[in-house]
Amino acid sequence: MENNPDTYFDETYELVKKYTDDRLLLLKIQTAKKTAKVTSKVIFIFIASILAFFVLMFIGFMAAYFFAEKMHNTFYGFATVAGIFLALLLLFMIIYKSYFSGKIKDMITGIFFENDPYDLNEDDEA
């Protein structure tokens, strides 16, 4: 076993190159995992939103016909439900920045900056 400087630097270069390649691979795996997690949550929220939209739409129709029957006028029944939905929209817009915006930012930031970056086998599906 010689202590040839050329051999030492060649071996060190190969070790540094392998370490760099391994770190890049780890970064790619972590990025893919976090992107998949965000994509999964976005798809879940999208599908849940569509289903919630249809549920609210049919509840709105039921409420509109209920109010129309009570007021003996279809226009007033649907106008009442439209007013309720408009009030809910305005309420949501008022509280969005103070509550929902921060929660969404925290969720996305939490996904990308988890405490243990080397734990690739965690099951933290919510």
Image (tube, rainbow, N blue to C red):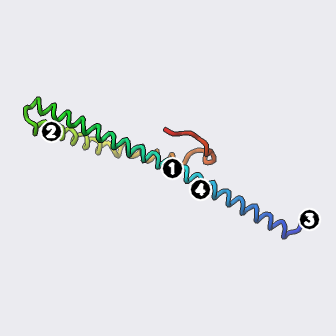
Q: Distance from label 2 to label 3 (Cα)?
A: 91 Å
Q: Label 1 amino acid?
A: Ala
**For discs 4 and 3, the disc positioned in front in the rendered view:** 4
- Name the residue tied to disc 4: 28
SS category of the residue bearing label 3: loop
- Name the residue tied to disc 2: 78
Please tell me the numbered disc located at residue 88.
none
Give x and y (percent) for residue 58: 24, 37
Q: How crowded is mark 2: few (under 14 residues within 10 Å), some or many (20 or more)?
A: many
Determine the residue located farthest toward the right in the rendered image: 1
Contact between labelled residues 1 and 2, with CB atoms less than 8 Å apart: no
Mark found first going from the N terminus, 4 or 3: 3
Mark found first going from the N terminus, 4 or 2: 4
Q: Label 3 amino acid?
A: Glu
Mark found first going from the N terminus, 1 or 4: 4
- Name the residue tied to disc 1: 36
Residue 99 picture quarter: top left
- Of residue 16 and residue 48, the one placed in the foreground of this image is 48
- Name the residue tied to disc 3: 2
Q: Distance from label 3 to label 1 (Cα)?
A: 49 Å
Q: Label 2 amino acid?
A: Phe
Q: Distance from label 2 to label 1 (Cα)?
A: 42 Å
Q: Distance from label 4 to label 2 (Cα)?
A: 53 Å
